[in-house]
Amino acid sequence: MGERTPAQTTASEHVRVPDSHRRTIAVDGSAASGKSTIGRRLAEQLGYAFLDTGVMYRAVTHAALERGLSLGNSAAIGELAQTLPIDVSLDCGGSGTRVTIDGSDVTSHLRSQPVEDAVSIVSRIAAVRDALVSRQRQFAERQPIVMAGRDIGTVVLPDADLKLYLDASIEERARRRYADFLAAGNEVSQEIVLEDIRRRDRIDSEREVSPLRPADDAVIINTDGLSLDQVMDRVNSLVRGDE
Ligand code: DC
């Protein structure tokens, strides 16, 4: 898997991080908890790369659906994940993560309804997780990085310099996801969005392999009622080591 060189910026005006510190930041959280938005913004401020690991699970799911694999066929999907030539160009300086499979750009398919419906099932397969986790670790070895996902603090980067776990009530998360859909011009009912988040929460937190949960040493931030700027203020103070 390839990646672009991260922007050669150092800590921003607002956030000063000692050179030897906090080169890996884990941002975990449930569906629509804001981890990608917060993680991307933090990475931009610090001049770090940003990897939203959800896109990797989505890419495997898209490829499995394209190949007509049954979602019950864990062995075939696991093997696909091990061999699939996925290329993720890391988000650097807000450039946006692009995902290609075998040279073809699949980024626009990753949030399609079939992928939304199937991705939690695919993410339960141990061989899929093994394949993707080892690639995620390689990214972190190469550059300072903010990595967002479900198991970054617990499994992928257990030694991350800072672990954040974002949470919000299901109603708040559904409201945000619904607003995202509307902004993107997608027509969908708020009830369906809420049900989908509920279903994903259940599968992600009840699965046997790497279930969604905060690492023991993660800082849990409940974002209910907080604006993006307020959450970033808190995150920045944690990055600076003020608290
Ligand atoms: O964050 P997201 O909605 O793009 O994630 C899509 C799915 O991928 C989600 O249902 C769970 C899975 N996932 C995971 O199991 N582990 C990760 N580190 C990231 C995502």
Image: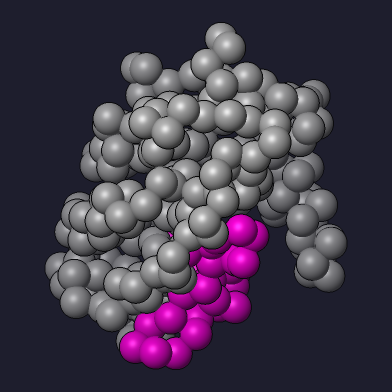
Tell me which residue sits at (30%, 72%) in the image.
Answer: 1
Residue range of the region highlighted in magenta in the rendering: 90-119
Tell me which residue sits at (56%, 9%) in the image.
Answer: 243
Tell me which residue sits at (47%, 44%) in the image.
Answer: 146
Tell me which residue sits at (55%, 44%) in the image.
Answer: 10
Question: Where does residue 214 sit, x and y in percent of width and height?
Answer: 41, 25
Where 121 falls versus 61 (above or below)?
A: above
Could you tell whether 127 is left or right of 48 in the image? left
| Residue at the extreme top | 243
Question: Where does residue 43 sit, x and y in percent of width and height?
Answer: 56, 46
Answer yes or no: is residue 162 visible: yes
Could you tell whether 138 is left or right of 91 in the image? left
Answer yes or no: is residue 223 visible: no
Picture quarter containing residue 158? top left
169, 34: nearer the viewer: 34
Question: Where does residue 66 sit, x and y in percent of width and height?
Answer: 40, 85
Q: Is residue 114 magenta?
A: yes
135, 192: nearer the viewer: 135
Q: Is residue 152 magenta?
A: no
